[in-house]
Amino acid sequence: MQVEDIKRVAVVGMGIMGPDIALAFAGSGYEIKALDTQQASLANARKRLESNIRLMVEQGVLDQGKADVAVSRIHFTLDWEEVMGSAHYVTESVPENLNIKRDVFKRCGELCGKETVVASNTSSMSIDEIASEMKYPERAIVTHWFIPAHLMPVVEVVPGRKTSPKTVELALSLLDGIGKRTVVLKEHPAFIHNYIQAAMFRAALTLVEKGVCSAEDVDTVIQNGFALRLCTIGPIRMADYAGLDTSLNLFRYVHDKTGEDGFKPPKILEDMVAKGDLGMKTGKGFYAYSAEEVESLRKLADVTVLKIKKAVDRLEQA
């Protein structure tokens, strides 16, 4: 199957993310079968879809005509056999429970065409474990979306040991075609996003637990600190910006004072500093930089912070 052969997409699970994923595909022209096992879940999904559409129209990111067309492409149903028998691509967004997901993939293996790719929206689990009882596990893959799925631009794509290259290529082509930015990574618990997010959350809770600050203090610092830069400069490029030697010294000092394993200096960082690759100030760190690129990135970071601050101020005054 080629990406141009995909016309009908099935979204399994109409909980928190299912309606958003359905809208993302419907907005790009796909016919959607939105499947669940409970009529109440479908009713709630319709309400969420209507709320999403209303907000997008109000904010001017979607006109009412296109919104109406997108909604008309989404069909809510409890009919598992009919949905799976006609789907060209399936993505599940059921609860983060291995047994539930494994059952979904097993049933997809029995009911779907043998070329139909079946993707999991798991936020942390191995696709090899999820698809362990599935026929044709070579067509199983993780596509991890983020809340709200119809708006967030990135999707993590994680093949398993049995996932075929053709499956990876098809998933990437499909997601790229609906405007998503994709990253392909090796299997690792929690992938990229949630691994880093969990580490930050753990650090935040540690500070609160130690009585260093309140939960509100943590959120205030993050919201008004590095969070303003992250959409322009990620944490690794930011370390290049600040200087990798500075980052290494921070790791060493905090590790010495706290003894926490999480602050033991990473070998990759020690090796780079030892080589003299200190980031922007030396022209090379995790990235390479020309003088023009350094100045451009610094200006971009400043402009982004200013724009976000203005937007937040307007929202708070509204």
Image: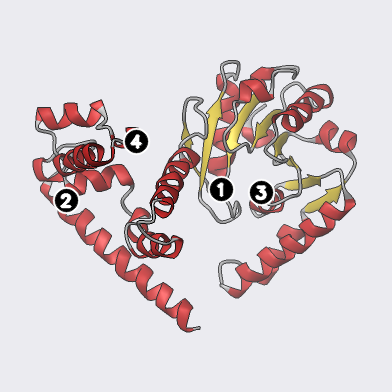
- Mark closer to the observer (4, 2): 4
Q: Give me the residue at 75% from left, 27% from top.
A: 105
Measure how far apart labels 2 and 1 are at the Cα level. Answer: 31 Å
Q: Give me the residue at 11% from left, 48% from top.
A: 291
- The location of residue 101, given as percent across then percent down, is 72, 31
Quick check: 188 above or below 138?
below
Q: Give me the residue at 59% from left, 18% from top.
A: 164
Sequence-wise, the earlier of marks 3 and 4 is: 3
Front residue of 179/145: it is 145
Quick check: 173 above or below 203?
above
Q: Are marks 3 and 1 in contact (CB under 8 Å)?
A: no
- The location of residue 265, given as percent across then percent down, is 24, 32
Say whether residue 105 is left or right of residue 275.
right
Say whether residue 69 is left or right of residue 154.
right
Sequence-wise, the earlier of marks 4 and 2 is: 4
- Mark closer to the observer (4, 1): 4
Q: Are marks 4 and 1 in contact (CB under 8 Å)?
A: no
Front residue of 251/138: it is 251
Label 4 belongs to which residue?
Answer: 262
Circle 4: residue type = Gly
Give neighbour class at mark 3: few <14, some 14-19, many 20+ (Cα, 10 Å).
many
Sequence-wise, the earlier of marks 2 and 1 is: 1
Label 2 belongs to which residue?
Answer: 294
Circle 3: residue type = Ile
Measure how far apart labels 4 and 1 are at the Cα level. Answer: 26 Å
- The location of residue 90, given as percent across then percent down, is 72, 35
